[in-house]
Amino acid sequence: MSKMEVKTSLLDNMIGVGDMVLLEPLNEEAFINNLKMRFEHGEIYTYIGSVVISVNPYRPLPIYTPDKVEEYRNRNFYELSPHIYALSDEAYRSLRDQDKDQCILITGESGAGKTEASKLVMSYVAAVCGKGAEVNKVKEQLLQSNPVLEAFGNAKTVRNDNSSRFGKYMDIEFDFKGDPLGGVISNYLLEKSRVVKQPRGERNFHIFYQMLSGASDDLLDKLKLERDFSKYNYLSLDSAKVNGVDDASNFRTVRNAMQIVGFQDDETKSVLEVVAAVLKLGNIEFKPESRVNGLDESKIKDKNELKEICELTGIDQTVLERAFSFRTVEAKQEKVSTTLNVAQAYYARDALAKNMYSRLFSWLVLRINESIKAQTKVRKKVMGVLDIYGFEIFEENSFEQFIINYCNEKLQQIFIELTLKEEQEEYIREGIEWTHIEYFNNAIICDLIENNQNGILAMLDEECLRPGTVTDDTFLEKLNQICATHQHFESRMSKSSRFLNDTSLPHSCFRIQHYAGKVMYQVEGFVDKNNNLLYRDLSQAMWKANHFLIKDMFPEGNPAKINLKRPPTAGSQFKASVSTLMKNLQTKNPNYIRCIKPNDKKAAHIFNDALVCHQVSYLGLLENVRVRRAGYAFRQPYEPCLERYKMLCKQTWPHWKGPARVGVEVLLNELETQKEEFSFGRSKIFIRNPRTLFKLEELRKERLEDLATLIQKIYRGWKCRTRFLLMKRSQIVVAAWVRRYLQQKKYKRIKQSTIVIQSYTRGWKARKILRELKYQKRCNEAATTIAAYWHGTQARRELKRLKEEAKRKHAVAVIWAYWLGLKVRREYRKFFRANAGRKIYEFTIQRIIQKYFLELENKLPSISPIDNNWPMRPYLFLDSTHKEMKRIFHLWRCKKYRDQFTEQKKFIYDEKLDASDLFKDKKSLYPASVGQPFQGDYLEISKNPKYKKLSDAVEEKIIIADTVNKINRANGKGATRIFLLTKSNAIIADQKSGQIKLEVPLGDITKVSMSSQNDGFFAVHLKEGSAAACKGDFLFSSDHLIEMATKLYRTTLMQTKQKIYMEISDEFLVQFKQDKVCVKFIQGTQKNGNIPTCKRKNNRLLEVAVP
């Protein structure tokens, strides 16, 4: 459905039929086809009235987003498409607004998606209830209890990769506002036999594989485990790895969930130690050893495994070893000790492993309940979520399947009873005549199992408690005697059996006709599993453990509390738990989710009709539909019904002003609907046949098309008229603006013409006045001008005379010079050849210089600035040139080298140059620092979690972070502190806590003083009157003095544009409060290496001993 398309009813844009009550015709084939059609279109939810059918898609679907949560929030149940959120919202609003306790029953076979459905219900409720720190904490703990229980109680089976091997019922408690206060979890019948043996293709409980895959090597060493699954007999290897499951990641999730729920670190450690001990129990093997009396006694083959188990659990090795070899039986005042043979020892080992794991799981549930229970004692509203194993029919069905199917019988019984009760109550509430509905009542099957006298569980308990030889065969014989005539019980020896000659029913089996079909049970193991016995020697050995959890799990091992009474059997315990659960459910308003598995391959897009048909049959879904529509198939409140169909009647369209019921009556009378097809309740209209509803929907669809055409016509007319009026208004506005523009243009043109005329007039007047002024001025200056011309004429005549006289004298000089030159040239012409030597000399020198430069080009050294090689000087007269060429070449390659520097490298060299200017030939410590790079952040403040608090407190970039010794002003002793330098402040912080002790603005630092010795002692002088100078100047000792002082100098210069004065002297003054103290450096022997030792001599002197 597109984003623009909004669904306002279950009936809008249906794929198939969203509510099976409206299915027509109602038969098994149509039911399956409707589920299949919706499944293929991604619609996995379908209603049967208020019951939700959920088909497992085996793939992620985009229907559980926060937007979907908001879409279904506070909406009517039938208002939107079928969804588990609709049922969750209906239950939550009924609890919050109507003060009705709710329960959500999730049923279905293994792999149908019950566990995921319960998670979705809880996540929806958590999303829509209140907010707040305390509420969010409770919600998070409730949600995080699931991963813990799944890890310890779920396992991979052939039908489901995450099958719940226990039943879980969670009561979530709310306050009057609907905010969660806490919860209580009840668990039922953990399949503890899985600990010691798993069917082919299945795994042990998840926690074993998660721990071996996800635990760190250090944790595995502490638990004395190896990562290889094949090392442990209790782990099946054929299915150790599951596709798409990351056991290591899941282990981290479980550890995190335990921490959120409230488990302490020592509790988590103890739980993992018990799990490791259970895993290692499977590696203990026994061997027979003959005794003097001829009896066999079991002995442990390799005691190394036993030793490691005892180290994990704190049990005395000899005590546990004896418990595996002997059994003590107490009767009144007598104790008899008997030896165990190898088979009995293996039985004792497996019984101990199963009991340890089962009791650990029960302890986990109690511990989670302790964390998530409501802390207040106010009256609470309760919503229960039941996620329990579905009906199971395997090739081999044993005691566990019998108990599970008994529980499902009880759930089916309460489902039918509550559904009929709800239907009957609604009819009575609405004043509709109730018609009795025929349905199959499975109470007869429940009685066959749970009857206190002749029930199967009662006979099993009787067999377990009676003296003499008791076996599974004697139990079956008793069943054949008591239940032989029961119509739902069959066995090989049963008189009512139709299969007396059928070999498919072996002698060691019996068959029960459950509501879901016939199931054949193998009696092998019924007695042992029901007995649930653990030898008292093992219980006492566990109680003696120096391990608080194991000691707490085996209270019956306490010698002071020995009880000779047999413990209750597993069957009786489970029967009592189921009875309590049924009573609890009957006090609440029920909501049902029926989960269906579409195929056995756990694959997406595959719908197995036969498999689904079988589940639909044993879930009784068709029967549920028939119960729902035995009277009326569809019911709806008058207001939404009238709102949906009011367009079908002229009297009710578009608005009905009277009561909604009257409007619906007028509507149905107008449509001439037969009166037997509907009935009027007090608040709802009841429609008997789905065809009537579909006819209304068809008429509504046709009417909506007509209304859409009408709306389009009116809309188009409105749109055209609106456009015309808009164009008309626009034309008026445009015309007004044009007229305004033309008038403005005309006005500007007139204004411009006026200005031109004015300017010409003013110009003419100004020129006239100017001519008059000029004439008057010329008259006044005429005399002066004539005089000036006369004087000029006289001066030019005199100048001309002087020039002619000078020319005559110059001519005589020129003639004389030429004459002298001629005489000299005649005199020296005979010496012309003497200049040839000089020319040859100059040519030779020129050639030598050319040769020098060419040879120098071929012999140039590398361009490394530190390469001091240079070719030999070829001629002595080129000595100065040779040196100058060497200097020029060195400058050139230094420039080339500098051009390769990055900005960061230039910054580092700038710091080194500044350090050289400040300390070279002044501080003895400087030469050692030249080769050391300036790192700045020596403590890695931002990365080290120890300093996270300090890192968060400092907002500016950290230039240097290092530890320094802060010298006490009173006694000269040092204390370790963290020194931080940022762009604006120098910060001193405590090293252990990371708390900031003092912040000094860089503008308050005036001077830094230090000695000329090879020490790291320095003093920071502060500006008088500043806030940081209340106690005086600071004295520090650092291993990185040169770097610290250089960075402090550069940062202060960049920040304040002022240079810090660096005083390097073996004696200087510092200010301590009101006193000035002289710091004097002397030579002395050091106890702590090169660290200077300070000693306060008196009020005016502090001596620093340096090496």
Image (cartoon, rainbow, N blue to C red):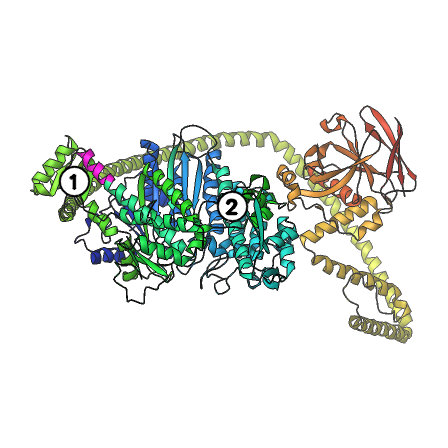
Q: Nearer the viewer, residue 617 or 650?
A: 617
Q: Secondary structure at mark 2?
A: helix
Q: Position of residue 207 (x, y in %)?
A: 52, 53
Q: Nearer the viewer, residue 41 or 834?
A: 41
The magenta-colored residue range is 421-434
Amino acid on which the number 1 mark rests in the picture: Phe
**705 falls in the magenta region:** no
Q: Position of residue 867 (x, y in %)?
A: 81, 64
Check the picture and name the quadrant holding the C terminus: top right
Q: Position of residue 67 (x, y in %)?
A: 37, 44
Badge 2: residue crowd in 10 Å (few <14, some 14–19, many ≥20): many
From the viewer's perspective, tell me whether residue 815 is left or right of residue 317: right
From the viewer's perspective, tell me whether residue 633 is left or right of residue 937: left
Label located before the other in sequence (2 or 1): 2
Q: Which residue is mark 1?
A: 686
Q: Which residue is mark 2?
A: 257
